[in-house]
Image: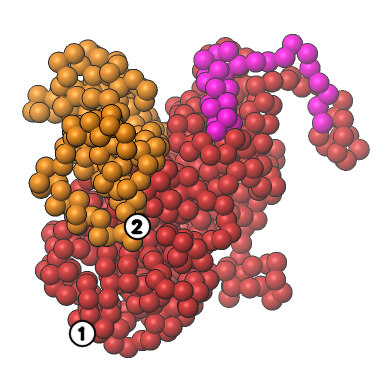
Amino acid sequence: MSEELIQIQNTFRFTEENQREFDALIGHYPVKEAAMLPTLHLAQKQAGYVSPAVMTYVAALLEVPLMKVKDVVTFYPMFFEEPVGEYVIRVCHTLPCALRDCKGVLAHLKAKLGTDVASETDLGKGTTPDGKFTLMKVECLASCDVAPVIMVNDDLYKNLTPEKVDEILDNL
Amino acid sequence: MVEEKRILYEHLDVPEIHTFDVFRQHDGYACFEKAVADYQPDDIAKMVMDSGLKGRGGAGFSTGLKWSFVPKDIKPCYLCCNADESEPGTFSNRYVLEKNPHLLIEGILICCYAMGIETTYVYIRGEFTLGKKRLDAAIKAAYANGYLGKNIRGTGLNVDIYTHPGAGAYICGEETGLIESLEGKRGQPRNKPPFPAVEGVFRKPTVVQNVETLCNLPFIVGNGVEWYTKMGPTYGDARFDPPKPDPNTGTKLYCISGDVNKPGVYELELGLTCAELIEVAGGLRGEQVKAVIPGGSSAPILTHYELDTRLDFTSLTLAKSMLGSGGIIVMNETRNIVDCLLNIMKFYAHESCGQCTPCRWGTPWVRDIVQRIADGNGRKSTITRPKFGIAENGRWGDTGETEDIYEDLDLLESVANNIANVDTMTWNTICVFGIAVSWPAVSYMRKFRPEFEATIREGKLTTLSVEEATVPPEENYAYQQRIVPRELE
């Protein structure tokens, strides 16, 4: 590894707790590379997003070329390559939610937060200036019976109306 | 009037059933104990084969047959449980994972015992945070009580279960995509053969099963094959003489959403009709059914003329659609089919993994055509062409009439059929994602052509009444070709 990469890598380290979790993870698989997704999830939870430093660190941990990590990060929509807000709001907009007016929920969120919807190549577009919220559209969240739904970080909110959205945002 | 009767998932709504103690109180793990005490592994594989259990994930492939492909002499062998439920309209796996994760563990244990498997990976959708938390807690409790780990309950059986979170890619629900993703790579499906049963994860034999399929196993073992096969119809496959039995046995967790009064998960025996299911789900919200998607968004749509189709694997396949994952989406008379197709095509254009050119370029192309039509810029030629059909002499030919040329509809069908041809059922892609795109695109357009034409003519989204929007049965290609299977005596 070049000097430069080692320097980038040194700016990110797992906390002791996460390191323990990682050590347990790696034992689940016969090859280290297979722990890629859980490791990236863990790192993203700690760092907020998958920065170049995180990628080089993970590559070194899993003993794979950096390119392989980048390859994976760019493929999966749940990994962010740019900083995101403290609360990531995912609005489902696939057919069953669309039949139950997810457009109204999205429009209300846009107006309330005063931000646009993030695109995959430009997460900053959907992030509020204070860095508190990131608004993004996602595909089916598998909760079509309680549509429309949104996810705020790890929590799912069901049967939404604009009033309920207000309530959720106020309680964050 | 059909009513929901929970058989396999009777205890799904018991409070705290996701904890080990409550699950044990409801005879949890009793079927696994019975399996180990009373049967040899091969007996269980034979029972699963005889039960006619078909995979509940989408393809509807016989589980027993899949198991029989696994070579016995190559070890280790892996089990991958597919909990990457992302098909729009489907949410049964989420229910099972959140409410009764121990049932899944019991199913996994029986599968592992039958196949001599020691390691199981549960590939769980990244968005299922509660489901993963519940399953992780259940696995921990099972380890603590000696139902997982080394030498389970003194039987000499070793089974480990690990959960593996996905990261939001639809294609990882395809079995080889799931395997690639599990190996820490992009979830791009592999060429088959070799099938996963021969060479799967870490290049070892792998059994990939859906959550719901595995949840059926305890009941097949616990109550016997005869009890299980009484549920659901067994058809006779008329291509053979005498007709070969084609079992559609067991129950299914039907997920119904859209314009019904009580959307949700309903456990019902396979083989009820579409209209009956809508009744079970509290009836239609609205005046009239316009369309029903019978098996997740990739299944060809059914019109209101086809509501008598029975919702099981064989009947839907013969009606030129599919049961898929059992996600039923109902649309009432206020819905615009062009708008619905646009929504679904946006989904597929977003989720194409980008590996095969026809799909990578074709899906955004189809989306753009539908977008153009929905925006009111659909292309229609100024000239007309002779209309072909049943001519005066009763034979196929020039009818003497002319018809308008809707260039964009012809283009839509052509592009979709070049990703995967729905008439010949051949696809130009590695995985079946291709057919999942062209099936809805072509079936919506052919079955609701008047609405597409009206939208192009008017230059804006035009919603016609149900009768006007639907192609009548005599011109509906699927209705004309459909075969209603007959049950074996």
Residue sitting at the far right: B393
Is mark 2 in CB contact (under 8 Å) with mark 1? no
Mark 2 — on which chain does it sit? A
In percent of width and height, residue B205 lies at 46, 67
The shade of chain A is orange
Instruction: Look at the image and give the residue range highlighted in magenta.
Output: B360-388
Q: Which residue is mark 2?
A: A31
The shade of chain B is red
Tag 2: residue type? Val
In percent of width and height, residue B301 lies at 54, 41
What is the quadrant of residue B141 in the picture? bottom left
Would residue B128 be visible to someone looking at this image?
Answer: no
Q: Nearer the viewer, residue A21 or B54?
A: A21
| Residue at x 82%, y 31% (from the top left corner) | B388
Q: Nearer the viewer, residue B174 or A53?
A: A53
Determine crowd level at label 2: few under 14, some 14-19, many 20+ residues with C-alpha closer than 10 A.
few
| Residue at x 42%, y 43% (from the top left corner) | B186
**Eye-nearest disc, 2 or 1:** 2
- Relative to residue B175, is residue B425 drawn left or right? right
